[in-house]
Image: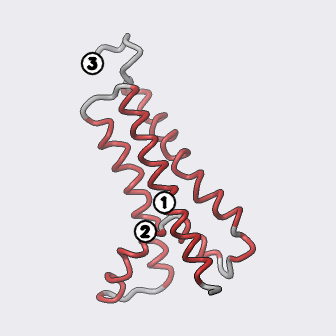
Amino acid sequence: MNVGTPTQITPWLFPRFLLLAFCVMAVWPLLGVAASFSILEKMSEAVLLFGGLTVLFLLPVNMLVPFNESGFVTAIIIVWLLIWAGCTLWFTSGSSTRGLQLAALVVVSSISLCQSVLGFLMLLGKYV
C-alpha cells in the first residue's frame, strides 16, 4: 500500500473512518428518537428506530427461542452494530479508495434511514 497517495486510506486512518461511518449511521435513529420522543411509552421502544427491519427478522427467532424484552433489545442493537461494522469492512476490504469509502457511507446511511423509517412506522402503528 502506497501511503503517499491521497486516494487510498492508510491503516492508521481506518479507525477514524469507522467512527465516521458510525456517526453517519447513528444520525437517523437519533433524529427519529428526537422526533418521536413524545410517542415513546418506554425507552426500549426507541430501539425500534435503530432496528425496524431487524425486528421483522428477529420476530420468528423470538417465536422459536423466546427471550425477554431486554434480550430482544440487545439482539437489535447487536445486529445494528454488525450491520455497521460489516458494511464498512466489506466495502473497504478489497481496496480503500475514497470512492469505496463514499459508497460505504451511503450504504450505511441508507440502511439506517430505512431502519429508522420502518421503526417510526411501527411506533405510529401502535396508535392505529
Along the viewing direction, whichever of 90 and 56 lies nearer the viewer: 56
- Asked which quadrant contains residue 23, the reply is top right
Q: Amino acid at mark 2?
A: Leu
Foreground disc of the pair 3, 2: 2
Q: Is residue 115 left or right of residue 66?
A: right
Along the viewing direction, whichever of 8 and 110 lies nearer the viewer: 110
From the image, tell me which residue sits under label 2. Answer: 53
Instruction: Give the SS element for disc 3.
Output: loop
Foreground disc of the pair 1, 3: 1
- Kindly indicate whether the residue at mark 3 contacts the one at mark 1 (C-beta within 8 angstroms): no
Q: 80 above or below 25?
A: below
- Kindly indicate whether the residue at mark 2 contacts the one at mark 1 (C-beta within 8 angstroms): yes
- Per the rendering, the mark at residue 1 is 3
- Chain-order first, disc 1 or disc 3: 3
Q: Amino acid at mark 1?
A: Cys
Question: Residue 93: where, in percent of width, then height?
Answer: 28, 36
Q: 4 above or below 54?
A: above
> Callout 3: few (<14), some (14-19), or many (20+) C-alpha neighbours within 10 Å?
few
Along the viewing direction, whichever of 9 and 48 lies nearer the viewer: 48
Extreme residue toward the right, this view: 38
